[in-house]
Every structure is written in C-alpha cells, then in structure tokens.
Image (spheres, rainbow, N blue to C red):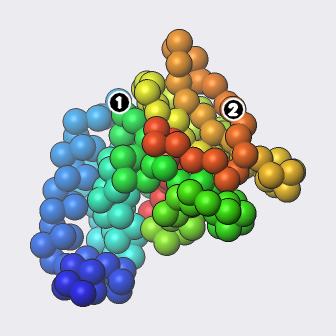
C-alpha cells in the first residue's frame, strides 16, 4: 500500500494534496463566476480550511473527474454547496449500476461498483432530479453521457432507478433497471461545506 493509499484510507489529505486542491478549486471558482456571482472565494476557503474532512471528499470528487465547484450558499445552514460540474458525467464514476442490491442481483457481468456505495464512500450525496435540473440551468451538462440521480423509494422498490441527461437542449429523465450499467452513465454528487 502506497503512502497515497494510506492517506486516502484515513480520509485526510497530505499537505501537498491540500495545497493542490485549494489551488485547483480557487482557479475553477474564479473561472466560473457565473455559477456563484455573489460569493467570495476567501469565505469559501475559510470554510474549507475549517472542515478538512470535507476537503477529502472534494478531493475524491476531483480525483474521479467531477470538477467540483460552488453552485450556491445556504444561508440557513451556513453552508456552501458544491456540485460536480464536469461537462460530462465524471469519467472515473461510470459503468456502475445504481446500488448494492442491484449489484448483488446480477448473476454475471457485474460492474465493479455501484453509484450509491461510491458516493457514500466519497462522503457525498447523489444529486436528486431537482438538483440535477438546477445544475442544467447553470450550463449544458451530460450532452454525451448520462447520470444516475437519487431514485424515489417507490420506484426503487419495484426494481427501477432513474437517470438524467441533456439532449436536444432539453433535460430528460429516464428509467432503467437498477442493475443496468453503461460506459456512458455515471453519477454526479453534491457536498455541503
């Protein structure tokens, strides 16, 4: 096991990883001011520095291709909200079925993982359909890929799961068996800091 693996298992970043992530997040924040017009980076960074376990989760979002960025601020909770803002579904989170139950139900050709467990391991939540639509109002995402979204319990109990994408300049919501997986389908998450 490498030192990087040991650090990842402890859910803390090395000083080098910490510095690199803060630099990456700051550059992305400044590049994409349209996502957070009224927010200031110094306040976001202060929150991040006070919540190092959240930095680990943001690093996991970054490491798996999510390109996390601030999309809002919840005044009541005093939390900044980060979404995966990569143009397409995060590259290293694709080819996964919806949840553990779906994964275990497959008799053959099982994917390596599932969206719900991966998100939990990363310390993030899957976007809901409403949150996904909010992201799509900020830009054009998933024009070639699709993303699992948090599925209502009544649909999941019947074996299904839902996913979204953007085609023809319209956001679509679809259904599939929760055990299905495709190379162009991953998931997007959110983190509150």
Count of labels shown? 2
The one of 136 and 114 positioned closer to us in this rendering: 114
Secondary element under disc 1, as helix, strand or loop, is helix
Residue farthest along the left direction in this orientation? 16
Looking at marks 2 and 1 on the same chain, the residue that comes earlier in the sequence is marked by 1
Q: Residues within 10 Å of mark 2 (few under 14, many from 20)?
A: few
Q: Which residue is mark 2?
A: 174
Q: Nearer the viewer, mark 2 or mark 1?
A: 2
Examine the image and state in which quarter residue 38 appears. Answer: top left
User: How far apart are the alpha carbons under marks 2 and 1?
Assistant: 29 Å
Q: Is residue 167 visible?
A: yes
Quarter of the rendering occupied by the C terminus? bottom left
Q: Are marks 2 and 1 in contact (CB under 8 Å)?
A: no
Q: Which residue is mark 1?
A: 34
Secondary element under disc 2, as helix, strand or loop, is strand
Residue visible at 21% across and 79% down? 4
Examine the image and state in which quarter residue 87 appears. Answer: top left
Q: Give residue 114's position: percent from left, percent from top.
A: 56, 60
Q: Residues within 10 Å of mark 1 (few under 14, many from 20)?
A: few
Which mark, by number, is residue 103?
Answer: none
């Amino acid at each position: 096991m490498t030192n990087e693996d040991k650090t990842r298992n402890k859910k803390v970043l090395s000083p080098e990883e910490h510095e690199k992530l803060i630099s990456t997040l700051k550059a992305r924040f400044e590049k994409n001011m349209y996502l957070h017009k009224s927010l200031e980076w110094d306040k976001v960074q202060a929150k991040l520095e006070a919540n190092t376990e959240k930095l680990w989760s943001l690093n996991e979002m970054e490491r798996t291709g999510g390109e996390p960025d601030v999309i809002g601020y919840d005044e009541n909770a005093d939390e900044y909200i980060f979404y995966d803002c990569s143009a397409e579904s995060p590259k290293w989170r694709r080819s996964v079925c919806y949840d553990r139950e779906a994964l275990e139900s497959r008799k053959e050709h099982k994917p390596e993982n599932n969206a719900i467990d991966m998100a939990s391991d990363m310390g993030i939540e899957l976007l809901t359909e409403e949150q996904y639509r909010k992201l799509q109002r900020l830009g054009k995402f998933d024009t070639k890929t699709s993303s699992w979204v948090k599925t209502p319990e009544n649909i999941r109990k019947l074996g299904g799961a839902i996913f979204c994408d953007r085609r023809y300049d319209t956001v679509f919501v679809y259904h599939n068996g929760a055990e299905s997986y495709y190379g162009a389908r991953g998931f997007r998450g959110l983190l509150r800091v």
